[in-house]
């Protein structure tokens, strides 16, 4: 069974941010903050979608970074992005992964700057 990586490379985060751009928030946290029911709803959503968007409403008394870390830890997910009062969580589906992340090794890069021909 494959597990979610503890850290994502910059390229992988960029890929997830691009995928998450058009998503609507599936869970919204209000004046009660992070509750057991919010964790349950988030768990059900991440099992279905792998990548979910969570929004903290202005009434939410908790800090967005703390909530993202707590919820990510509770779900076994990685925070892919935090932007304003919204964050993306990613957890690879254990049996049927849908999202294909770029490989961690970006591969060899040319030492010459872009647009510059190397003299051979």
Image (cartoon, helix red, strand yellow):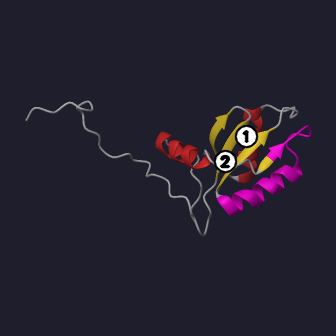
Q: Quadrant of the N terminus?
A: bottom right
Where on the picture, by quarter, is residue 91? bottom right
Q: Which residue is mark 2?
A: 89
- Whether residue 64 appears in this view of the structure is yes
Q: Residues within 10 Å of mark 2 (few under 14, many from 20)?
A: many
User: Would residue 105 be found to the left or right of residue 2 on screen?
Assistant: left
Where in the figure is residue 29, as x and y percent of width and height? 84, 42
Q: Which residues are magenta?
A: 28-49
Q: Provide the secondary structure element on which disc 2 rests.
A: strand
User: What residue do we see at 24% from left, 33% from top?
Assistant: 111
User: What residue do we see at 50% from left, 54% from top?
Assistant: 101
Where in the figure is residue 62, as x and y percent of width and height? 83, 33
Q: Provide the secondary structure element on which disc 1 rests.
A: helix
Earlier sequence position, callout 2 versus callout 1: 1
Where in the figure is residue 93, as x and y percent of width and height? 62, 62
Q: Which residue is mark 1?
A: 68
User: Would residue 9 be found to the left or right of residue 57 on screen?
Assistant: left
Q: As displayed, is residue 114 above or below residue 88? A: above
Q: Nearer the viewer, residue 3 or 67?
A: 67
- Whether residue 8 appears in this view of the structure is no
Where in the figure is residue 24, as x and y percent of width and height? 71, 48
Majority secondary structure in the magenta region: helix
Q: As displayed, is residue 31 above or below residue 90? A: above
Q: CA distance from mark 2 to mark 1?
A: 8 Å
Question: Does the CB distance between marks 2 and 1 fall below 8 Å?
Answer: yes
User: Would residue 68 be found to the left or right of residue 102 on screen?
Assistant: right
Q: Outermost residue toward the bottom?
A: 95
């Amino acid at each position: 069974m494959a597990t979610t990586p503890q850290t994502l490379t910059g390229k992988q985060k960029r890929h997830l941010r691009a995928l998450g751009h058009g998503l609507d928030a599936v869970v919204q946290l209000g004046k009660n903050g992070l509750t057991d029911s919010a964790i349950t709803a988030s768990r059900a959503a991440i099992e279905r979608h792998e990548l979910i968007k969570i929004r903290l409403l202005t009434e939410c008394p908790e800090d967005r970074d703390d909530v993202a870390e707590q919820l990510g830890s509770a779900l076994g997910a990685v925070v892919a992005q935090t932007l304003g009062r919204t964050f993306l969580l990613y957890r690879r589906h254990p049996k049927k992964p849908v999202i294909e992340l770029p490989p961690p090794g970006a591969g060899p890069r040319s030492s010459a700057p872009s647009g510059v021909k190397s003299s051979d």
